[in-house]
Amino acid sequence: MSAVSPLSSRSGVAQPGPLWRVLASTDHKSIGLTYLAAGALFFLLGGIEALVMRAQLATPNNTLLLPQTYNAVFTLHGTTMIFLAVMPMLFGFANYLLPLQIGAREVAFPRLNAFSLWITVFGGLLMYLSAFEGAPAAGWFSYAPLSERPFSMSLGQDFWAVSLFLVGVGSSLTALNLLITTLRYRAPGMELNKLPLFSWMVFVNSFIILFAIPALNAALLMLEVDRALHGLFFGQAGSAVLWQHYFWLFGHPEVYIMILPAWGIISEVIPTFSRKPIFGYEFVAGSTVAIAFLSFAVYAHHMFAVGLGWPVNLAFSASTMIIAVPTGIKIFNWVATLWKGSIRLTVPMLYAIAFLVQFTLGGVSGVSFAALPLDWETTDSYYVVAHFHYVLMGGTLFALLSGLHFYFPKMTGRMMGDALGKFSFWLTVLGFNGVFLVQHALGFMGMPRRVYTYPDLPGWGALNMFSTLSAGVLGVGLTLTLWNIVRSWKHGRVAGDNPWRAWTLEWWASSPPAEHNFETLPPIRSRRPLWDLAHPDDADYRRPGRHDKGGHIRQEEKDHA
């Protein structure tokens, strides 16, 4: 019998190869996985850049990197992690899960979805092509006049602006697609107040993206007019503060663009492994809407040292304190869900608990910036570096890792290795806290950020060396997670359709889901249709307005036994 080419069927009709199927696919699941893979690749690049910076900062007066080289690595690291790693990975989860959670067969505009993916990927590649023309070196925030001519003559700065403009277009189109999908393609019975919290937070997040990203793209367009056409927006005859207004009008909502879907993941993981419904669904959902509005009202707390005047500073100080309230509500709801739950310490749950601890610490340090005297003392110090890494890495990254371990069986039909997962978890937690916890102290000791080296002052060298060594531990932990993914993809234990005994609609589909997602759908009468199906006598829709007191736990454990 003659061999059959992998590009041909037995009938002789040419079939597309796996690479072409990925490139040409409009299936939301394939696009979601491609987003995750692209984000992971850029995260790897950003992680290498972080290790290079930590090597430079390991000892005082180090000369491993030249100042301009350090600035370029610093710029690429920040830009990569925010725009090319975290956001694409969150879009990956949103693309994959939202249609499954609402009972849809596909997103509203499949071809537009594919276009959004590839324009984002192309924008990321363009960013790294800038290295051939002189990598951008004005920081990921590119404050004017550092990003203007004659301070930045390199074409790399133009690559940076065009790259982020393309990424912004892709992000906005993705948000529009997810928004319309949620509004128009929900299954019968799936009302907005029955959305799983992950889908609800993606839905609200789409509004933030559609209002925030255009501010950045407008600023990028004006920057290019300045650089290429000698405009007067931000340059020597323009206003450097105007750039900060535009950038942070995007930049602070961007924090919530990166954290809201992560909160959605945590809101799915904690109830599943506590064997309880989420405590206070309405408060979690309502506080998300409040954050969406308030995220645009706090942006100038990044500008307290600019000289905006007391009335403006006091207004943004107050709004910064107020936005902590809906954020704190979520923390209390997650902790209340854990309280008296039948907790299973799986790898996804371990990452979720670590998220709670680290994000809370990052939130507390964030509230401290609302106090103007403390903000003036710590601005542009390593205290700020510690704060935003605890929020965006201790928060978003750990939520992504929790979601990755949680949804890996649904995406692949295989379980990730449990022992290796727990080992890499502890390395990641210890490494992360070792890197950034000591940076709070460095900030209070006066070490400025955005510097390529520092003098040999008491304590600075020892704390920086500890931070750098911990970065190596963190890198090993994340590398082991990557190895666990690669190994488990083909050789992991077969998972089944619902290995975690979860309750939302995505777990009704096969693992991995069929091309059209569902053969049939169960009746959707509550927020937990799979619970209702398995426990008709104790279904949620039979218990309107009643808080769960643990009966669900006892009943389910009894049924499982």
Image (spheres, grey):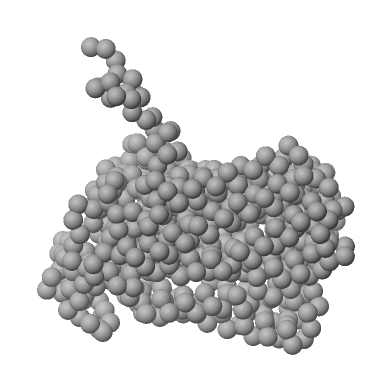
Measuring from the top left, give residue 80's x and y in whole percent. 62, 50
Residue placed most toward the observer, 260 or 376: 260
Name of the residue lying farthest toward the left = 537
In the depicted structure, whether residue 361 falls above or below residue 48: below
Q: Answer left or right for 231 relative to 509.
A: right
Residue placed most toward the observer, 169 or 314: 169
Residue 181 in view in this figure: yes
Measuring from the top left, give residue 462's x and y in whole percent. 74, 55
Measuring from the top left, give residue 317's x and y in whole percent. 67, 82
User: Residue 314: which quarter of the image?
Assistant: bottom right
Residue placed most toward the observer, 399 or 314: 314
Residue lying at 58% horizontally and 44% vertically, measured from the top left: 122
Q: Answer left or right for 115 relative to 376.
A: left
Tell me the quadrant of the picture where the N terminus can be found: top left
Name of the residue lying farthest toward the top = 1
Residue 398 in view in this figure: no
Measuring from the top left, give residue 354's x and y in whole percent. 48, 63
Residue lying at 25% horizontally and 22% vertically, measured from the top left: 10
Tell me the quadrant of the picture where the C terminus can be found: bottom left
Q: Answer left or right for 20 relative to 227.
A: left
Residue lying at 15% horizontally and 74% vertically, measured from the top left: 538
For the image shown, how many numbered marks are present on the structure?
A: 0
Residue lying at 68% horizontally and 85% vertically, measured from the top left: 315
